[in-house]
């Protein structure tokens, strides 16, 4: 239902959403609360994939992204939160959240264009 809504003819950003559509072999996890880890299978999926690095993006950087980053850091993942790939209700809240993730969680907030995805995947 979400994909149908976001790709409808009158949906704003439908072209962007189409770029992000999952393939048949992609994993996805539905998140019922603030953290992507809370009451989900994310930890199990990441363990299965032998993941060590996580790149987090999203809406509500000062809530959902921050809480997921916190839970990832507690699980010893290296966390990347590209500064231009998160947004919060206000610019001030977003800057504060990014600073918290950098300082407290040791997250890397390097811009997405500067990330070496090939190196991070190995």
Image (spheres, rainbow, N blue to C red):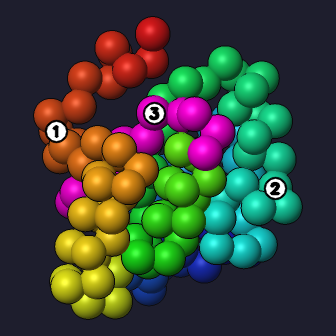
* Residue pointed to by mark 3: 78
Q: Bounds of the magenta span?
A: 74-84
- Foreground: disc 3 or disc 2: 3
Left or right of 46, for residue 113: left
Which comes sooner in the sequence, label 3 or label 2?
Answer: 2
Q: Residue at x 84, y 61 (%)?
A: 39
* Residue pointed to by mark 2: 40
Circle 3: element type: strand
Circle 1: element type: helix
x then y, percent, for residue 45? 76, 34
x then y, percent, for residue 51? 60, 24
Which comes sooner in the sequence, label 1 or label 2?
Answer: 2
* Residue pointed to by mark 1: 113
Label 1 – label 3 distance at C-alpha: 18 Å
Circle 2: element type: loop
Label 1 – label 2 distance at C-alpha: 30 Å
């Amino acid at each position: 239902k979400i994909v149908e809504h976001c790709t409808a003819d009158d949906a704003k950003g439908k072209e962007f959403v189409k770029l992000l559509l999952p393939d048949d072999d992609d994993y996805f996890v539905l998140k019922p609360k603030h953290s992507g880890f809370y009451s989900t299978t994310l930890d199990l999926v990441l363990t299965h994939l032998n993941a060590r690095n996580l790149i987090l993006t999203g809406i509500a950087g000062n809530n959902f992204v921050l809480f997921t980053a916190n839970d990832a850091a507690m699980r010893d993942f290296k966390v990347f939160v590209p500064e231009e790939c998160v947004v919060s209700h206000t610019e001030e809240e977003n800057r504060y959240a990014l600073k918290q993730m950098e300082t407290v969680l040791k997250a890397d907030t390097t811009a997405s264009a500067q990330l070496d995805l090939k190196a991070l995947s190995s």
